[in-house]
């Protein structure tokens, strides 16, 4: 899970050639900042964040090896081009279903940037997480109505 501030820190680290908190190659990023974890639960509500907020960061992360992103909403032409160029995929998670999606998360590990609270980087293991392909590796978008 990564959101705005974690994206910014990752790109700053890349630009300064610092060691990253995890290997980006082959990873899928879920644009999400979960709510506080209730007692006895693995994670709080964890619905998708509007993906266009990450568009300025996405081409650089794709260049570093990210293979997929999960979020909600349309992406910019620059992101679609980068998805095509780097053969990645953009998945859509159902919006408004954060409590349901939390039930699909089986394990959460805090990876980096703890000070960011809900925007800290987390590794999640999921099962039966409902997604659809929003933009495929050829750049075909579900939002293209032509």
Image (cartoon, grey):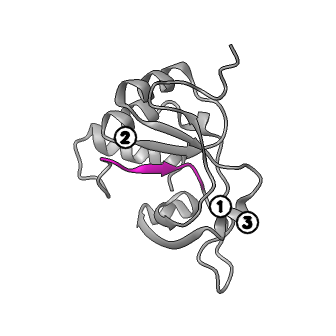
Secondary structure of the residue carrying tag 1 is: loop
Q: Main secondary structure of the magenta part?
A: loop
Q: Nearer the viewer, residue 145 or 66?
A: 145
Q: Residue at x 25, y 40 (%)?
A: 16
Q: Which mark is residue 99?
A: 3
**Residue at the top extreme of this rendering:** 146
Horizontal relation, residue 21 to residue 128: left or right: left
Up-down relation of residue 22 to residue 107 (above or below):
above
User: Which quadrant would residue 83 be assigned to in this image?
Assistant: top left
Q: Position of residue 128 (x, y in %)?
A: 59, 63
Q: Is residue 5 magenta?
A: no
- Label 3 sits on a secondary structure element that is helix
Residue found farthest to the right: 96
Q: Earlier in the sequence, mark 3 or mark 2?
A: 2
The local crowd at label 2, few if under 14, some if 14 to 19, many if 20 or more residues have their Cα within 10 Å, is some
Residue at disc 2, secondary structure: helix
Which residue has dot 1 on it?
Answer: 46
The nearer-to-camera label among 3 and 2 is: 3
Looking at the rendering, the stretch of residues picked out in magenta corresponds to: 25-32
Residue 44 x, y percent position in the rendering: 66, 70
């Amino acid at each position: 899970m990564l959101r705005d501030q974690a994206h910014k820190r990752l790109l700053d680290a890349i630009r300064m050639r610092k060691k990253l908190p995890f290997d980006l190659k082959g990873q899928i990023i879920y644009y999400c900042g979960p709510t506080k974890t209730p007692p006895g639960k693995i994670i709080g509500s964890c619905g998708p964040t509007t993906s266009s907020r990450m568009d300025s960061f996405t081409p650089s992360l794709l260049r570093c090896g990210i293979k997929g992103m999960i979020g909600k909403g349309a992406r910019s032409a620059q992101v679609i081009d980068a998805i095509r160029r780097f053969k990645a995929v953009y998945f859509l998670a159902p919006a408004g279903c954060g409590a349901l999606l939390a039930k699909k998360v089986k394990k959460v590990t805090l990876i980096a940037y703890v000070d960011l609270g809900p925007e800290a980087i987390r590794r999640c293991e999921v099962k039966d997480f409902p997604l659809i392909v929003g933009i495929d590796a050829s750049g075909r978008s579900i939002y293209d109505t032509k």
